[in-house]
């Protein structure tokens, strides 16, 4: 069994979902960083990572909006002197730990993106600028 058979899916998950660097992945899998970089290019991990982060962001925004709306309705009931629906209050209280976890996750991702940004313009960053900002597509 090759290293690719053994570690590829774990390495891909670490890069996409756990926001680990290629160096960190290489150390965890016992692989060469160049090997991980080749897998990343072959598997188009950057596009997968972008889609993953976009879907997470959309979900987080919807969660925040739902929580804000729920909190607003609870506040309206309190201000108007009406009895607060216990179901809404219970739902809001149950959501708070999830919202805190989402916030912690976002802080970790933001920190990793900021730390990665300190390394300068990598080929991946340049390609992302070309595609997302300039609208240029590279031919394969």
Image (cartoon, rainbow, N blue to C red):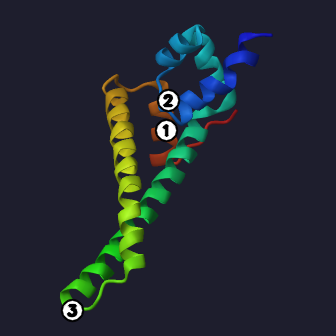
Would you call the spot at circle 2 few (<14 residues within 10 Å), some (14-19), or many (20 or more)? Answer: few
For image coordinates 39% across by 43% down, the residue present is 105
67 vs 55, nearest the viewer? 67
- Position of residue 62 relative to residue 133, above or below, is below
Upstream in sequence: badge 1 or badge 3: 3
Tell me, yes or no, if residue 134 can be seen here.
no
Q: Secondary structure at mark 3?
A: helix
The nearer-to-camera label among 1 and 3 is 3
Alpha carbon separation for disc pair 2 and 3: 54 Å
| Image position, residue 130 (x, y; %) | 49, 40
Alpha carbon separation for disc pair 1 and 3: 51 Å
- Position of residue 4 relative to residue 137, above or below, is above
23 vs 75, nearest the viewer? 75
For image coordinates 62% across by 36% down, the residue present is 138
Q: Looking at the figure, which quarter contains the N terminus?
A: top right
Tell me, yes or no, if residue 51 can be seen here.
yes
Residues marked 2 and 1 touching at CB (< 8 Å) = yes
Residue 124, label in figure: 2
């Amino acid at each position: 069994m090759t290293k690719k058979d053994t570690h590829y899916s774990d390495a891909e998950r670490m890069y996409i979902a756990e926001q680990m660097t290629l160096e960190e992945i290489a150390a965890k899998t016992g692989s060469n960083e160049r090997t991980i970089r080749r897998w990343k290019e072959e598997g188009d991990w950057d596009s997968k990572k972008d889609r993953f982060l976009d879907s997470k962001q959309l979900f987080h925004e919807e969660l925040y909006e739902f929580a804000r709306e729920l909190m607003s309705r609870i506040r309206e009931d309190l201000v108007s002197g009406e009895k607060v629906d216990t179901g809404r209050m219970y739902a809001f209280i149950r959501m708070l730990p999830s919202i805190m976890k989402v916030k912690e996750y976002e802080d970790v991702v933001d920190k990793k993106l900021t730390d990665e940004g300190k390394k300068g313009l990598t080929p991946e960053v340049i390609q992302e600028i070309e595609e997302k900002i300039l609208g240029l597509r590279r031919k394969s």
